Amino acid sequence: MATTHTSGADSPVHDLRADLTGLATEARRTDLSGIDRMDTEAIVRAMNAEDATVAPAVGAAAAVIAAAADAIAARMARGGRLVYAGAGTAGRMGVLDASECPPTFNTDPEQVIGLIAGGPTAVRDAVEGAEDDPRAAAADLDALDLTGDDTVVGISASGRTPYSVAALRHAAERGALTVAVSSNPGSPLGAAADHAVEVDTGPELIVGSTRLKAGTAQKLVLNTLSTVAMIRLGKTYGNLMVDLRSTNDKLRARSHRIVEMATGAADDEVGAALSASGGDVKTAILTVLGRVDAEEARRLLRACGGRLREAVESAAPGD
């Protein structure tokens, strides 16, 4: 049987069309209406010019992003998790950021989680109608047994995606911290959040393709939230990535360079420190700077909650 498409004045589709009409991300750049007739380099330059507006738009939201990052870090320090929830491009951005935290910051795979409407299959293939199912969002979060120490970040360019909005509302009911990331100020998603990061990226180069500027803004915001939280959790030493996992030749070489940059030690001393520490960068740095053996370095790191700077300052060089 053929599916009936209803778009009359009383239909949900008609209501949604009315909603989209008022969204900046759905507006049309009339000055680009002839983009298909432009030469290729002109299109590239036009797209680059549009992309250049994203970072300043994110910067305008710096204060609220910082507040959200501090709140996330405080809960993660108590054992809470960071959970991203979105549909389509927004969901994929959350999955991407979550998947990069373990190799970058040595987090447990269950510490930063990316939920996408339609499940893992939706990362590669569109799952029709998944974003319109608020009950799925609640079910996905219930499977995680949320606590008050967890944070749920709802992501949606429009700020009205049912899956994302429902995720924040359900998370709030469970006592979790809620953060909204959208590109339309005054959105339902923002209204449902403790911290509303609403980056006004304006109309897209191609109408309806919010994987462009809005997607870029989402990536920048999520990178910032997770990275700042990890810095606050002691996952870096200055701007050095000291909690990385040395799981391949490139990362082993990077580990060596990081220990060298952190300590200023000679190549042989760095190699010996890494060998004694079993390849653990933090331990190796502490053995050099604190003039302690690997066992004592590990003890100091445990006592300082894994915060290398505190461990270095607590060590007694020369003892």
Image (cartoon, helix red, strand yellow):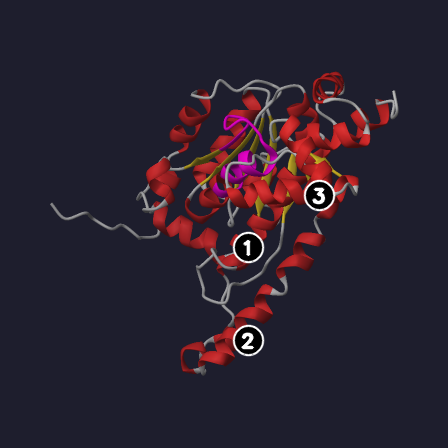
Residue found at x 44% / y 59%: 209
Chain-order first, disc 1 or disc 2: 2
Compared across the picture, whether 103 is left or right of 224 comes to left
Residue with the most extreme left position: 1
Q: Where is residue 203 in the image (x, y as percent from the top left)?
A: 54, 63
The quarter of the displayed image where residue 148 is located: top right
Q: Distance of mark 3 from mark 2, alpha carbons?
A: 45 Å
Q: Where is residue 8 in the image (x, y as percent from the top left)?
A: 31, 53
Q: Distance of mark 1 from mark 3, alpha carbons?
A: 40 Å
Residue assigned mark 1:
216
Residue found at x 51% / y 49%: 158
Q: What element carries label 1?
A: helix
User: From what the image shows, is residue 98 above or below residue 283?
Assistant: below
- Which amino acid, by three-letter code, is at mark 3? Asp
Residue 130 in the magenta stretch? The answer is no
Of the two numbered discs 3 and 2 in the rendering, the one whose residue sits closer to the viewer: 3
Give the magenta-colored segment's residue range.
Answer: 96-113
Q: What element carries label 2?
A: helix
Q: Where is residue 272 in the image (x, y as percent from the top left)?
A: 68, 33
Q: What element carries label 3?
A: helix
Q: Quadrant of the C terminus?
A: top right
